Image (cartoon, rainbow, N blue to C red):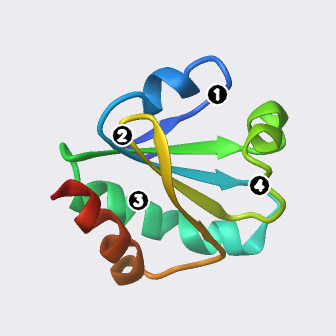
Amino acid sequence: MVNANVLTVTNKNFDQIISSGVVVVDFWANWCGPCRMLSPIIDQLAEQFAGRITVGKVDVDRESELASRFRIMSVPSLLFFQDGKLVETSVGVKNLEELSSIVSPLLS
């Protein structure tokens, strides 16, 4: 199920998407069990902060250039950007509260 609040991020649109505001990018893979566990939590995060942050997903198998650019060695990996700058990273499955506690300070 596709969430309208979560963008599909590619090498072509990545720099534009992260250029302004708070952006959370989920690097994932279809074969990754933990990625499937994190996916509904990412959807909840996008809904909780709708209109205040941008949430996107990068399929590392399709967008290997982006995975290499950010040295993604494990999935799921979350990268948090603020106005185009990488400000936080998170590897592995996190719950909604943990992710919210990373996002909230970036909005203030």
Q: Decide: marks 1, 2 in contact (CB < 8 A)?
A: no
Q: CA distance from mark 1 to mark 3?
A: 18 Å
Can residue 59 be seen from the camera position used here?
yes
Q: Amino acid at mark 2?
A: Ala
Mark 3 Cα-neighbour bin, 10 Å: few <14, some 14–19, many ≥20 = some
Relative to 79, is 63 on the left or the right? right
Quadrant in which the C terminus is drawn:
bottom left
Q: Amino acid at mark 4?
A: Asn
**Label 2 residue SS:** loop
User: Is 77 above or below relative to 54?
Assistant: below
* Label 1 or label 4, whichever comes before in sequence order: 1
Q: Which label belongs to residue 4?
A: 2
User: Is 67 above or below relative to 107?
Assistant: above
**Label 1 residue SS:** loop
Mark 4 Cα-neighbour bin, 10 Å: few <14, some 14–19, many ≥20 = few
Q: Residue at x 45, y 62 (%)?
A: 42
Q: Which residue in the structure is indicated by mark 1?
A: 10
Percent position (x, y) of residue 102?
37, 70
Q: CA distance from mark 1 to mark 4?
A: 15 Å
Question: Quadrant of residue 98 in the image?
Answer: bottom left
Q: Amino acid at mark 1?
A: Thr
**Label 3 residue SS:** helix
Q: Residue at x 32, y 76 (%)?
A: 101
State which mark lies toward you, 1 or 2. 1
Q: Which residue in the structure is indicated by mark 3?
A: 43
User: Is 55 above or below relative to 66?
Assistant: below
